[in-house]
Amino acid sequence: MIRHESIFTSESVTPGHPDKLCDQISDAAVDAFLQQDDSARIVVECAIATGVLFIAARFDANANVDMATLARRVIADVGYTGDSFDARSCSILTSFTPLDGTRRTRASHGDADEPAQEQVNAFGYACEETPALMPLPIWLAHKLARKLDAARSHGADWLGPDGKTQVAVQYKHGKAARIHSVTLTAATADRPIKAATMQEAMRELVVKPAFRDELLKPDASSEIHINPGGPYLVGGPAKHSGLTGRKTGIDTYGEYARQSGAALSGKDPSRIDRIGAYAARYAAKNVVAAKLAEACEVHLAYSIGVAMPISVWVNTFDTGRVPEEEIKARLLRALDFRPGGIERRFGLRERAAQAGDAGFFRQLAVFGQVGRTDLELPWEKTDVAQALRD
């Protein structure tokens, strides 16, 4: 939480950014395995560059997933069917290996004594800056990224799938005071576009609608930068490489708050480095929703082979209305932070198995894995706020 006068920036990207393309392919694979076998354990990582996609998968599942076909479908859905990168003709290399460990059965999901299989520091954060209890910079950056992606279907068909947004918010006395600047970088689908056309379209189709319902809007002194580095003719994998899990700041709090260095995408719900981040966000959000603090960070530390987190820590940044130790005690009474308890509460395997073609985890791979108001995510509920008040 910012407690002094400064400018803080966060960024988001569109689905065609190479890192996010890798995240979507990885999470689409997790969905596909769980739809065939809800007991599956699966870890999928992707790397992408000019004309080439590499998929490395480790799994233990009674499933038969055509990874290359799935990847081509995701790439095409994002919009890469042109000259610079084409879903139909790009080379796809795969490496499949068994996942070590004991095979879990359906009945074992949510076992209370299921230990953590990884070491991780999981962080969750919430604050009163936005209705979703997210920091304002990343909230606005995601809104702009959504509008930038949607603009391709609403009058700017010359835009490519690859784009980036950045918002700089000026803080005074710990509160967001004004929009310092907005930056949009957008590829133009392999063909040049007049600068005036780009400027007008980005302002009318992206910036204005993104801020329409916001209390804090760009003012006369706010800087609006559109492709400040010059024309961006070739984007996506033909321009820069991508890797699963490289955008954890975008996945979480825009670097406004701490996040684990571990990738979230490409992992099944047995991985505490993924679901621990969701549990920590759930805890922090319910603390703020319960009006116990204006801002809250929850830290969960896990050790390999131990079910209970070896440490639970709460920081309210001097905004707490209840002592932090008391908030921690209430959280431990209300929530089970063991891996099995998290799986049981969130029901992630069942959600993925029943999600259909859209997938469950794939939808998390862009525009943030926390703070989402467009999806019914269990860790975004505030259903234990009342219990925390008591």
Image (tube, rainbow, N blue to C red):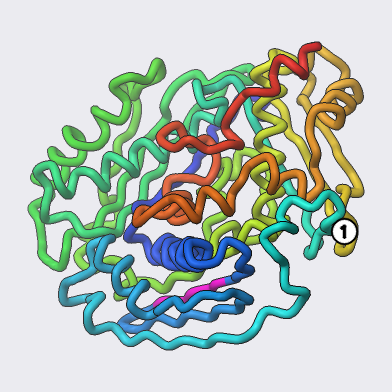
Q: Position of residue 163 (x, y in %)?
A: 31, 54
Position of residue 127 in the picture relative to residue 36 (left or right)? right
Compared to residue 98, the image places residue 386 above or below, namely above
Which of 157/383 is in front? 383
Q: Which residues are magenta?
A: 44-48
| SS at badge 1 | loop
User: At which x and y percent is residue 146?
Assistant: 32, 42
Using residue 185 as the reference point, say whether residue 115 is left or right of it: right
Examine the image and state in which quarter residue 221 appears.
top left
Main SS class of the magenta portion in the image: strand
Q: As shown in the figure, which amino acid type bears the numbered disc 1?
A: Ser
30 relative to 144, above or below: below
Note whether residue 19 is visible.
no
The residue wearing badge 1 is 303
Name the quadrant of the N terminus.
Answer: top right
Say whether residue 342 is left or right of residue 229.
Answer: right
At x 87%, y 53%, the residue is 113
Q: Is residue 226 visible?
A: yes
